[in-house]
Amino acid sequence: MPVPADPTVLHPMPEQPRVVLLKPLVKSPLIEVGEYTYYDDPEDATAFETRNVLYHYGPEKLVIGRFCALGTGVRFLMNGANHRMDGPSTFPFPTMGGSWSEHFDLLTGLPNRGDTVVGNDVWFGYGATVMPGVRIGHGAIIGAGSVVTADVPDYGIVGGNPARLIRTRYSETDVARLLAVAWWDWPAEHITEQVRTIMSGSVDDLEAAAPSSGAP
């Protein structure tokens, strides 16, 4: 009987230590990652929490779904990066210490766009940057070097700085069908049996392969 890949191992490809599964790696309670989502970095993929999730002082969360692929240098900027912009200077004087620290009230009420949420089966190209509070839909593709400043629709392909919608991968009707099938929520054993359909089949094929369809 086909055996699913193990979602609990840190290095799913032992000969390639540059690839890590993020779910068994991350420790921060502010980061949630689904099974099989991976990050690829030849320098130190295990430093993802400190090198790729920046200014994460809380309380907002970074939520990434299952089966996402993150290329080298993908970074998530969190709300802690924000500065005041309503006065003459944007410099955060109170954080520097001394008597300046008496003015921490000036740092309250900074812009906060909430959690950053990434759906399932999202592919991030090399060096993409995601700004605070962005929501990226299921099945999206984020082009290399993109700076994502706004929400990305399900199965959308975006690129550029700021990232713009280039096209959607499927028609609106087929996107709705794909979201209803939600293959990423299938039992791992069933996914294992249907890998070829998931990777190269049509929407019709995927619907026919869904567990509820009576497929083996």
Image (cartoon, grey):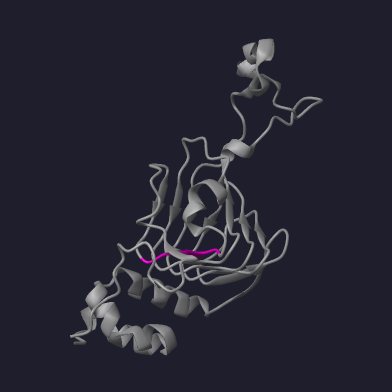
Viewer-closest of 125 and 109: 125
On whether residue 67 falls in the magenta region, the answer is no
Q: Residue at horizontal 79%, vertical 26%?
A: 89
Above or below, comparing residue 49 to residue 183 in the picture:
above
Which quarter of the rendering shows the N terminus?
A: bottom left
Q: Residue at horizontal 63%, vertical 61%?
A: 128
Viewer-closest of 195 and 3: 3
Viewer-closest of 39 and 113: 39
Which quarter of the rendering shows the C terminus?
A: bottom left
Quadrant of the rendered structure where residue 169 is? bottom right
List x then y, in percent, for residue 107.
63, 24
In the image, farthest residue toward the front: 15
- Residue 44 appears left or right of 89: left
Residue 116 visible to an observer of this rendering: no
Residue 15 visible to an observer of this rendering: yes
Q: Residue at horizontal 70%, vertical 29%?
A: 84
How many marks the image carries: the answer is 0
Quadrant of the rendered structure where residue 81 is? top right
List x then y, in percent, for residue 66.
38, 64
Quadrant of the rendered structure where residue 187 is? bottom left
Above or below, comparing residue 192 to residue 50 in the picture:
below
List x then y, in percent, for residue 103.
65, 14
Above or below, comparing residue 58 to residue 66 in the picture:
above
- Residue 187 appears left or right of 60: left
Above or below, comparing residue 35 to residue 49 in the picture:
below
> What is the magenta range?
36-41
List x then y, in percent, for residue 80.
58, 36
